Amino acid sequence: MTNKQTQFPIAVIGSGPAGLAAANTLLALGHQPVIFEKEKITGGKLSRWHQLFPGFISAAEIQEQLIGPLKKASVKISTETEVKTMKPDSGGLEIETASGEKIIAKGAVWASGYTEFDARRKEEYGYGLYKNVLTSADVEEMLAKDGKLPFDSADVKRIGILHCVGSRDEKVGNTYCSKVCCICAVKQAIEMKKLYPSAEVFNFYMDLRLFGKGYEELYREAQMDWQVNFIRGRVSELAEDQQGKIRMKTEDTLTGVPMKMTLDFVILMVGMEGKRFSFLSENKNTDGSDFISYPENFTGENQTALPNVMVAGACKGPSTIVDAMNDGKSAALALHQYLISQAEK
């Protein structure tokens, strides 16, 4: 690689699994990555997670595997730095942050991740009003921080886990599947049984989409080894009684029998949503979501309207951590190949 190619860095926007994997790949290919992260710490959503499915691996351990080589190579990581605009500049990119800082890069990998569905939009579930209604993200953060939830083990007899909150739901405008909620619900059900061994755990699902390696096996383990109950049916309403317990109404759609149940606390499996970026408007999805689209589904999954900007990870759509990391590597390689082709002209 010539000096002309290496005199400018490559910007990586986002330091979640996709961004960190992209930065590591770019580093291995001889480039100089510079990472921009709008939060105070690196890692994206991974930094807030406890354990990962299906093997209950520590999220912190995976994050260290990704960030460690970059720290060793003294890769510049700018936290609390939000990229606001990118525009072509003499064959490269001019990147401007929210604080007004500008840098010239020869290319960029956009890996800004996703946002979690705001469960308060499902008013019938009472999130934000009922203290015993949590989201799956709340649970991960609590377990990562304290290793426990704020409920006395002796008082917990029944726990409910609701699938597809904010996904596959025309009412909130998200008709797509968020891909990871089912297996995350199975994982959290097992974690609840570990924390509250004498409690009954009920998973309420539309249908189970367990496609990954080890997913089906973990589902069977949840049933056979941990006695987790799976009920096919969408919960219509949650209400809080005078004791703070949660009253639930649903229907078992396999038997057609209406059900009422009182639960000590409920976990809502919130889905993924995209983020809107005005300067990537040409890559807006036609399905109405704010995930970033790409021109071809088979050979151009990382491309944008700007030839030296690639997209990777969950900013394109719901993604597992493994998928996001692989996509980050793919985006880095695609950008590398483009830059090489331009240098040879």
Image: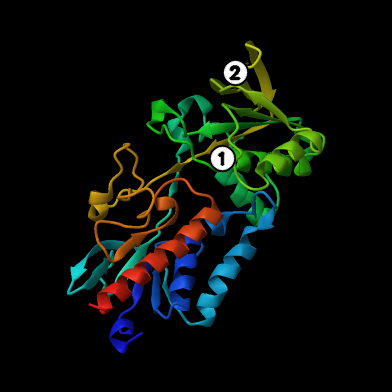
The residue at 52%/54% (across/down) is 323
Viewer-side residue, 264 vs 55: 55
Side (left or right) of 201 relative to 240 = right
Q: Residue furthest bottom?
A: 3
Percent from the top left, x then y, of residue 297? 37, 48
**Number of callouts in the render?**
2
Few, some or many residues within 10 Å of mark 1 (<14, 14–19, 20+): many
Q: How many residues crowd mark 2 within 10 Å: few (<14), some (14–19), many (20+)?
A: some
| Spot occupied by residue 222 in the image (x, y as percentages of width and height) | 74, 38
- Left or right side of 48 for 102: left
Q: Amino acid at mark 2?
A: Thr
**Residue at horizontal 79%, vertical 33%?**
227
Q: Secondary structure at mark 1?
A: helix
Q: Which residue is label 2 attached to?
A: 250
Q: What residue is disc 1 on?
A: 181
Q: Residue at x 46, y 31 (%)?
A: 168
Q: Which is more toward the observer, 54 or 343?
A: 343
Task: Kindly identify the residue that appears in the image at 69 percent across and 52 percent down.
Answer: 56
Q: Is residue 189 visible?
A: yes
Q: Nearer the viewer, residue 315 or 77?
A: 315
Q: Where is the C terminus found, in terms of image quarters?
A: bottom left
Q: Is residue 247 above or below residue 156?
A: above
Give residue 103's position: percent from left, percent from top: 27, 75
Q: Quadrant of the N terminus?
A: bottom left
Determine the image quadrant of residue 130: top right
Q: Give whichever of discs 1 and 2 has the lower sequence position.
A: 1
Q: Is residue 96 above or below residue 28?
A: above
Marks 1/2: CA–CA distance:
20 Å
Image position of 268 with respect to 138: above or below: above
